[in-house]
Image (tube, grey):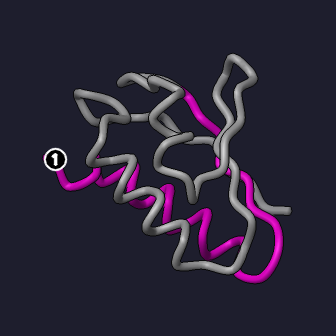
Amino acid sequence: MFAQTVTIQNEQGFHVRPAQLFSEKAGAFEAEVRLKTGEGCAVDCKSMLELMTLGIEQGAVVTIEASGDGEQEVVKALVQLIESKFGEG
């Protein structure tokens, strides 16, 4: 298992567009990937609907955990996506 903690940086948090980009990126890898919040909620990163239910806002600290083939690559790709603010500037 590989995990990394990251802070949500984009102004509007995890709204529809970031959730879509996040789930698409996660789905490009074989590894099982979960997103955990500081409140203990955990969802499948490949499910846009599950990601949306978390209501993650700017400044939230989340942990991305992956296991299986490409676990490090998928975590790094998702962290990079968050750090890029989902292309929102």
Instruction: State the residue in front, 73 or 42.
Output: 42
Residue at image location 42% in from the left, 35% down from the top: 8
- Quadrant in the picture for residue 70: bottom right
Instruction: State the residue in front, 12 or 84.
Output: 12
Q: Quadrant of the N terminus?
A: bottom right
Give the farthest residue toward the top.
Answer: 39
Residue 3, placed above or below residue 15: below
Residue 83, placed above or below residue 46: above
How crowded pointer 1 is (Cα within 10 Å; few <14, some 14-19, many 20+) is rated as few
Give the labeled residue for mark 1.
88
Give the farthest residue toward the front.
Answer: 49
Q: In x, y percent, where is residue 33?
A: 69, 59
Q: Is residue 35 left or right of residue 89?
A: right
Q: Is residue 61 left or right of residue 89?
A: right
Q: Is residue 55 left or right of residue 65?
A: left
Magenta segment, which residues? 61-89
Amino acid of disc 1: Glu
Q: In x, y percent, where is residue 59?
A: 41, 23
Q: Is residue 32 magenta?
A: no
Q: Is residue 79 magenta?
A: yes
Residue at image location 73% in from the left, 73% down from the top: 31
Residue at image location 49% in from the left, 43% down from the top: 49
Residue 15, placed above or below residue 65: above
Q: Secondary structure at mark 1?
A: loop
Instruction: State the residue in front, 15 or 85.
Output: 15
Residue at image location 56% in from the left, 40% down from the top: 50
Q: In x, y percent, where is residue 61?
A: 55, 28
Count of numbered marks = 1
Give the farthest residue toward the left.
Answer: 89
